[in-house]
Image: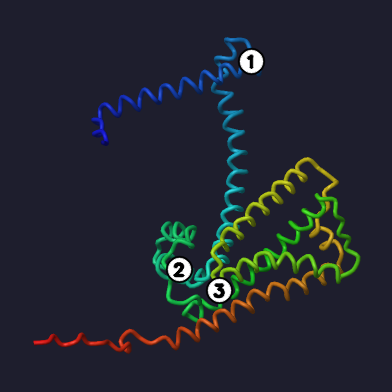
């Protein structure tokens, strides 16, 4: 049985006591920090409490907050991408969200629903029903495919390098296999969505973790000035012949998801246009009651 809500005055008094307790904990810990870690005199440690909070804690928190925001941004982007490719109706849902929320100025509601795109109501078709939306979706899919060809090529190269497997880039032909496998990872999740495989989202969810590890390792290697880590894309961009070959292969590989997506939409368009209207569905009248 739930208890009745406390009166306003009592809640205010409780909140005041809790604030005071929190303040004493922060100030007390900072005083001990100045005393023990900074080895300051007790009097100096007391008067340096505010300086320590502003310089050490606030400054350090700003750096941690910036790193945390970067992690959230990368994870949110990759997670949204996996939600899109693992959901067969995602592109039609995107179209509906743009017209129902974004273009109406409901920006907060749009982003909230976008982050939960796999929980939206199932639309009638898997394809956008406006030509402009269809073309924009194709451009979006091609761009995302290119991004993941780049990211997963680097991620796969890092996995091989960390396992002690050398992948030497001797000729332009060697630049086709790794990007092809990189493209196959997210594309296989989309194929699972085509066939309504129930664990497509579970398979796709490993991708944000893989890219997160790559980002953290690359960032730490850069900050510590490590010369041991060998980057795939760096080798490609430093060689003009390799770069031309990689761009040609990437342009072809990034179009493969578009080709199969178009086929998937063609099949659903055939089903959709041949679907009878509700008004054309014959109704059976109930039998007359016997007298």
The quadrant where residue 9 appears: top left
User: In this rendering, would 186 be left or right of 289?
Assistant: right
Of 146 and 132, nearer the camera is 146
* Placement of 131 over or under 11, stated as above or below: below
Residue under the point 25% across and 34% down: 5
Identify residue for label 2.
98
Identify residue for label 1.
36
How far across and down, in percent of the image, does residue 20 sit? 41, 22
Q: Earlier in the sequence, mark 3 or mark 1?
A: 1
Label 3: element kind: helix
Identify residue for label 3.
137
Circle 3 residues within 10 Å: few <14, some 14–19, many ≥20: some
Label 2: element kind: helix
The quadrant where residue 196 appears: bottom right
How far across and down, in percent of the image, does residue 35 sit? 61, 14
- Quadrant of the rendering where the N terminus is positioned: top left
User: In this rendering, would 1 be left or right of 266?
Assistant: left
How far across and down, in percent of the image, does residue 265 sit? 54, 80
Label 1: element kind: helix
User: In this rendering, would 234 be left or right of 263?
Assistant: right
The quadrant where residue 258 appears: bottom right
- Asked if disc 3 and disc 2 are in contact, CB closer than 8 Å, the reply is no
* Placement of 189 over or under 218, stated as above or below: below
**Between marks 1 and 2, how big is the CA–CA gap?**
56 Å
How far across and down, in percent of the image, does residue 159 sit? 77, 53
Of 23 and 270, nearer the camera is 270
Residue under the point 85% across and 61% down: 238
């Amino acid at each position: 049985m739930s208890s009745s809500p406390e009166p306003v005055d009592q809640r205010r008094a409780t909140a005041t006591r809790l604030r005071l307790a929190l303040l004493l904990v922060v100030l007390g810990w900072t005083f001990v920090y100045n005393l023990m870690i900074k080895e300051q005199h007790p009097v100096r440690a007391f008067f340096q409490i505010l300086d320590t909070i502003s310089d050490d804690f606030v400054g350090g928190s700003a750096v941690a907050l910036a790193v945390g925001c970067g992690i959230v941004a990368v994870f949110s982007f990759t997670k949204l991408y996996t939600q899109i490719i693992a959901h067969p109706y995602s592109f039609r849902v995107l179209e509906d969200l743009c017209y129902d929320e974004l273009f109406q100025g409901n920006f907060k509601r749009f982003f909230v629903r976008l982050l939960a795109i796999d929980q939206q109501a199932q639309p009638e078709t898997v394809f956008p029903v406006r030509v402009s939306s269809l073309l924009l979706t194709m451009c979006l899919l091609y761009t995302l495919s290119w991004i993941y060809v780049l990211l997963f090529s680097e991620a796969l190269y890092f996995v091989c390098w960390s396992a002690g497997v050398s992948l030497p880039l001797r000729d332009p032909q060697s630049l086709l296999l790794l990007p092809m496998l990189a493209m196959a990872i997210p594309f296989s999740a989309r194929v699972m969505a085509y066939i309504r495989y129930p664990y497509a989202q579970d398979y796709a969810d490993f991708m944000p973790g893989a890219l997160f590890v790559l980002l953290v390792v690359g960032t730490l290697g850069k900050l510590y000035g490590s010369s041991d880590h060998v980057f795939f894309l760096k080798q490609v961009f430093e060689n003009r012949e390799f770069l031309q070959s990689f761009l040609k292969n990437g342009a072809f590989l990034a179009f493969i998801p578009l080709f199969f997506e178009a086929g998937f939409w063609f099949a659903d368009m055939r089903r959709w246009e041949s679907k009878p209207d509700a008004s054309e569905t014959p109704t059976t009248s109930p039998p007359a009651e016997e007298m």
